[in-house]
Amino acid sequence: MTHIVEHTRIAVAVPAYWDGVNSLTKPGGPAAAAILAAGIGCFVMGLVTTLAAGLSAFSSAIAFVKPVGPLSGKSDIAIAAYFIAWLVLYLVWRKKDINIGPVGTATLILVALGVLGTFPTFFDLFVR
């Protein structure tokens, strides 16, 4: 038994952003915001690690939990940077379809710089 199926085209008005009802795809903005925010958080971790190695006053100021030392402040600041960046970027990009290529490239660069900032051979260059 053979069935013949006719394909028809239906014109539908689709909003420029995903509203959860009328569109079949979601915008890429929220995902791009989370990805770039992760890169920013990694970069801030490397930056804070380097600053703590070079500035003893900064190192003691970010020792939020005394038994842990400055590591507690480094991680807290990096996590806060991630969440703040994610929130701001999400609010700006939530209804936009962002090209993920440049966002991915920027994230990889930020992660690489963040990792570099956590290596002792790098941050020891800034120790007085």
Image (tube, grey):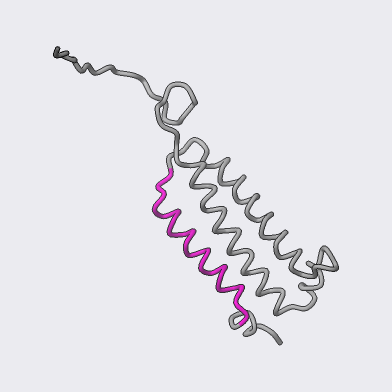
- Find residue 81 and report its horizontal and vertical position in percent: 65, 56
- On screen, residue 62 versus residue 45, left or right, reads right
Residue 89 is a magenta residue: no
Residue range (magenta):
98-120
- Find residue 92 and report its horizontal and vertical position in percent: 54, 42
Which quadrant of the view contains residue 9?
top left
Q: Is residue 97 above or below residue 18?
A: below
Q: Residue at x 77, y 72 (%)?
A: 58
Q: Is residue 99 above or below residue 40?
A: above
Instruction: Name the residue at the front extreme.
Output: 1
**Quarter in which the C terminus is drawn:** bottom right
Q: Residue at x 65, y 50 (%)?
A: 84
Instruction: Name the residue at the bottom extreme.
Output: 128
Determine the main secondary structure of the stretch shown in magenta.
helix
Q: Residue at x 52, y 41 (%)?
A: 30
Count of marks, rendered view: 0
**Quarter in which the N terminus is drawn:** top left
Q: Residue at x 34, y 19 (%)?
A: 12
- Find residue 56 and report its horizontal and vertical position in percent: 78, 78
